[in-house]
Image: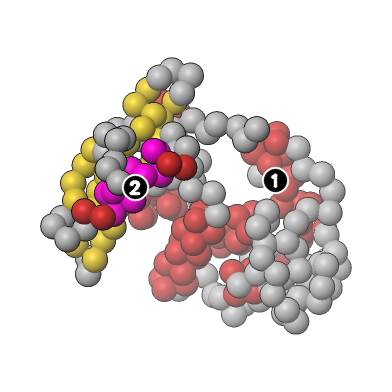
Amino acid sequence: MGVHMIVHGDVAAGFERVQHAFGANFDQHGDVGAAFALFVGGTKVVDIWGGVADVKKDREWDADTLTLVYSASKGITAIVAHLLAQRGELDLDAPVVSYWPEFGTEGKQDVPVRWLLSHRTGLPTFERRITVDEALAWEPAVEALATQRPLWEPGTTYGYHALTYGWLVGEVIRRATGRSLSRILAEDISNPLGLDLWIGLPASEESRVSRLIAAT
């Protein structure tokens, strides 16, 4: 079946089926706007995009469109933590309380930093409701986690910390270095490598962001 969506970008010989599959997401599965890149052995073999980035403004997706990555930010957060560990600025085997004393309540006093990174702390969600304003302010969220009782004994099992990982690891990073996670990512990783990658988007980049369409 032919691809009707206009797909922009570059595809190396032998990877044309990737372009067709990408286009089929629009023609057959209702996709609106997207981009895809593939590297093989360090070489970029596919770099394509198409569709609309902002339906309300009828803004097309282009090569510089930014998009949210959601839980992939956990991997980015872990990269920052491991960079600091490599530098000797963060000890993954040290107790969290050596950096963040307030965390040592409700049986969490012996939790090592590495359990935050491996989803073994027993704090996968917030016990109380956290408003958007509190989440963005940072301190109310980390204060809530510091005083919260774990849902299981830390270290005894694993549970995906979908909603809390960034605050748990990010607060240890902040306490250990005096810099926020977003600042370290920008100054030590994204800027030196020329990456369009942020946790905490600069206002100057907001016009490049694709807009989500709410599920109905």
- For residue 64, say whether it is visible: no
Q: Amino acid at mark 1?
A: Glu
**Residue at (41, 71) in percent of width and height:** 87
Name the residue that disc number 2 marks.
22
Q: How far across and how far down the image is residue 55, in percent?
A: 46, 23
Residue at x 33%, y 51% (from the top left corner): 21
Q: Is residue 45 above or below residue 58?
A: below
User: Which secondary structure, mark 1?
Assistant: helix
* 95 drawn magenta: no
Residue pictured at 26% horizontal, 38% vertical: 7
* Residue hosting label 1: 139
Q: Which residues are magenta?
A: 18-27
The residue lying furthest to the left in this view is: 13
Q: Which mark is residue 6?
A: none
Color theme of the render: secondary structure
Task: Please name which of the two marks, 1 or 2, marks the residue nearer to the observer.
Answer: 2
Instruction: Report the front residue among 176 and 186.
Output: 186
Q: Amino acid type of disc 2? A: Phe
Residue 22 painted magenta: yes
Instruction: Name the residue: 50% across, 56% down.
Output: 72
Q: Nearer the viewer, residue 101 or 185?
A: 185
Quadrant containing the C terminus in the rendered view = top right
Q: CA distance from mark 1 to mark 2?
A: 41 Å
Is 169 left or right of 12, judged from the image as shown? right
Q: Quadrant of residue 131?
A: top right
Residue 27 image-quadrant placement: top left
Instruction: Report x, y in % for residue 89.
Output: 48, 68
Neighbour tally class for label 1: few under 14, some 14-19, many 20 plus, Cα within 10 Å: few
Please provide percent x and percent y for residue 25.
41, 44
Can I make out residue 93 in this image? yes
Q: Going by the image, does 29 lie left or right of 21? A: right
